[in-house]
Image (tube, rainbow, N blue to C red):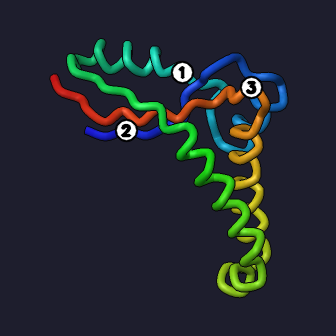
Amino acid sequence: MYIEDFARRAEFNAEDRRRLSADVYVPDGDLPTAMDYEATLKGAGFDDVIIQDQTDVWSAFVQDRHKSWVERKEELVGAHGETTYEQKGHFYESVKEVRSSDERRVLVPRIIKLRS
């Protein structure tokens, strides 16, 4: 089994929680830690859990995704319409901003091996 998701590295400030809840659709604007993920998976019967920190790779991806979205505005508005372009762009920007915070509060673990 393979899982890739957000996890909390440190406590979130109010703006991060707002963005996570309203813009990134994370319930309550909170996330589990990588250790929480591991404990939950082990509690579900998976004995062999390997977690790799993919934060740097993912950070570069979300920065590039947002930049490309903005640069391709004319093409994307033509294909999807202004409303869809703006909504998706807002989501991409929100993910980028939460990830770009000085304290790097969001971790992206890649849980690559689960064996029960």
Residue type at numbered disc 1: Pro
Dot 1 crowding, Cα within 10 Å, few <14, some 14–19, many 20+ = some
Please name which of the two marks, 3 or 1, marks the residue nearer to the observer.
Answer: 3
Asked if the residue at tag 1 contacts the one at tag 2, i.e. Cβ–Cβ closer than 8 Å, the answer is no
Give the quadrant of the C terminus: top left
Q: CA distance from mark 2 to mark 1?
A: 14 Å
The residue located at (36%, 33%) in the rendering is 111
Relative image position of residue 8 (x, y in whole percent): 60, 24
Residue reaching furthest right? Answer: 15
Relative image position of residue 109 (x, y in whole percent): 46, 32
Q: Give the image quarter of residue 39.
A: top left
Give whichever of discs 3 and 1 has the lower sequence position: 1
> For this view, does 24 lie left or right of residue 19?
left
Q: CA distance from mark 2 to mark 3?
A: 24 Å
The residue located at (25%, 32%) in the rendering is 113
Please name which of the two marks, 2 or 3, marks the residue nearer to the observer.
Answer: 3
Q: Which residue is mark 2?
A: 3
Callout 3: helix, strand or loop? loop
Residue type at numbered disc 3: Glu
Q: Which residue is mark 1?
A: 32
Residue type at numbered disc 2: Ile
**Taking 67 as reference, is 23 above or below it?**
above
Q: CA distance from mark 3 to mark 1?
A: 17 Å
Q: Give the image quarter of residue 51.
A: top left
Q: Which residue is mark 3?
A: 103
